[in-house]
Image (tube, rainbow, N blue to C red):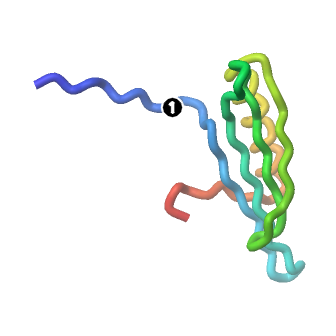
Amino acid sequence: MYHSPIQLDVFPTDVQMRRIDPARNMRRFYRLSVQRDLFGRASLVREWGRIGFRGQMMVETHPDEGKAITALMKLAAVKKRRGYEALQSGD
C-alpha cells in the first residue's frame, strides 16, 4: 500500500503569542501569519491588541514567501525578547 509522504513545514507560517502580567494589568496577544494575495505575492498579516478585544491589524506585502517568513521570524524573536510567549495549537 502506497502512502503519499507528508510534507512538514520547516518554517512557521502562523505564530500566535501572548503576554500576561497581572501586576501590570497586561493581557496582550500578537498574531503573525503569511498569506498569499491575489497577485501571487506573499503578505505578512500582523494582528495585536488586548486579549478579549478586536485589536489592530497591519498587512505587509513581500515579493515572495521566503522573505515574508523571514520577516515573521524576526518579529516573533523581537516579541519573545519583550516577554511574549508562543502558544501551542491547543492553547
Residue topped by disc 1: 9
Observer-nearest of 35 and 65: 35
Residue 4: percent from the left, percent from the top? Answer: 27, 24
The quarter of the picture where the C terminus appears is bottom right
Q: Is residue 32 above or below residue 43?
A: below
Q: Given the current orientation, which residue lies at the most extreme right position?
A: 24
Q: Given the current orientation, which residue lies at the most extreme front position?
A: 38
Around disc 1, counting alpha carbons within 10 Å, would you say few (fewer than 14), some (14 to 19), or many (20 or more)?
A: few
The quarter of the picture where the N terminus appears is top left
Q: Given the current orientation, which residue lies at the most extreme left position?
A: 1
Residue 13: percent from the left, percent from the top? Answer: 62, 36
Secondary structure beneath disc 1?
loop
At a point 44% along the width and 31% down the height, the residue shown is: 8
Q: Is residue 17 above or below residue 20?
A: above
Q: Is residue 17 above or below residue 45?
A: below
Residue 78: percent from the left, percent from the top? Answer: 83, 45
Instruction: Please indicate whether residue 74 sits to the left or right of residue 13 in the image.
Output: right
- Quarter of image, res 3: top left
Observer-nearest of 51 and 19: 51
Number of numbered labels in the structure image: 1
At a point 72% along the width and 51% down the height, the residue shown is: 31
At a point 85% along the width and 82% down the height, the residue shown is: 23
Q: Is residue 25 above or below residue 38?
A: below
- Quarter of image, res 50: bottom right
Q: Which residue type carries mark 1?
A: Asp
Residue 36: percent from the left, percent from the top? Answer: 67, 28
At a point 63% along the width and 43% down the height, the residue shown is: 14
